[in-house]
Image (cartoon, rainbow, N blue to C red):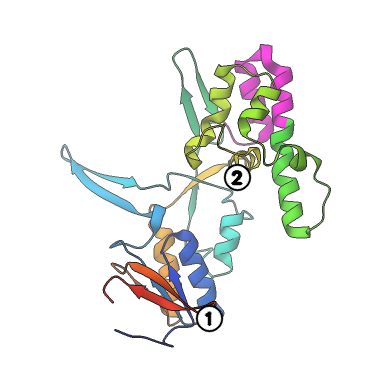
Amino acid sequence: MALKNAWDAIVVGSGPGGLTCAAYLSALGRRVLVLEQHDLAGGNCQVFRRHLGGHDYEFDVGLHYLGDSGPTGSIPTVLRGLGLADRITFRDLDPDGFDTLVFPDFTIRVPAGWDAYRDRVVAQFPDEEEGLDRYFAVLRALPGEANALMVGGEADAPTLLEWGLRPLADLFAHCGLSQEAIAVLDHWSGLYGSGPQESTAVMHAIIAHHYMHGACYPEGGGQVIPARLVEVVESLGGEVRTLAKVDEILVDGGTVAGVRLRVG
């Protein structure tokens, strides 16, 4: 089935990034088609439900909490540009401990706010205060310097130049931290799926910074976010198709000309 020239843009994948892109393109007057190989749009915002032991349970595929979702946060700001700020409500998690880390010999709760986070870790490892302060100084500086460099193009970024692309393990070693302290500080790796040897210091810092504004959860579950984004795309003349696996992106003379689906 050929649909040449039917669309101004085709977005492959209906995760939150793809749907946000599609929604903004639609708002700019483009006819947009979103193609998703799964039977449900949403990517890691999807949920699934199971009836177990006489009870109904809802499970999040990936979005178990979000950061930076206060009134002026980055996520509501993106949604506001699409007219969705008032259509998705974020419920705050406990600011004194939105994560609880349980180890054999101690339990530590991760609070919102750099100062509170630093003090909580130092209270657990008082003999490592000097090294922890070196670590937190680097971690707090990296997100701001990276943002200034991306937005302004030219910025003074000494911490980013020294540590940004080095493995997080190098920073831990530089600060002389114990394995127990590293295990606490590296708990963020569960959000991006790689260890200190594979992770850059700046990626780790940006993830941590995202949650220093506090953590929250979308009312109604993670699926609410893609549902609202799909509504924007479809209300503006676009289409979101599930069970539509893309086998190939077609290129003609160096320019993308379309896609070929598995079904043709």
Which residue is painted at 40% across and 75% down in the image? 259
Q: Magenta segment, which residues? A: 111-136
Indicate left or right for 25 with 166 as reference. Answer: left
- Residue 222 visible somewhere in the drawing: no
Out of 152 and 112, give the one closest to the viewer: 152
Q: Nearer the viewer, residue 213 or 241?
A: 241
Q: Is residue 22 left or right of residue 177?
A: left
Numbered disc in front, either 1 or 2: 1
Q: Is residue 146 above or below residue 225?
A: above
40 and 156: which is toward the camera: 156
Using the image, determine if residue 35 lies above or below residue 113: below
> Residue at 51% of width from left, 63% of height from top?
86
Q: Residue at x 74, y 39 (%)?
A: 141
Task: Tell me the tag on residue 210.
Answer: 2
Mark linked to residue 253: 1
Residue 67 drawn in magenta: no
Quarter of the image containing the C terminus?
bottom left
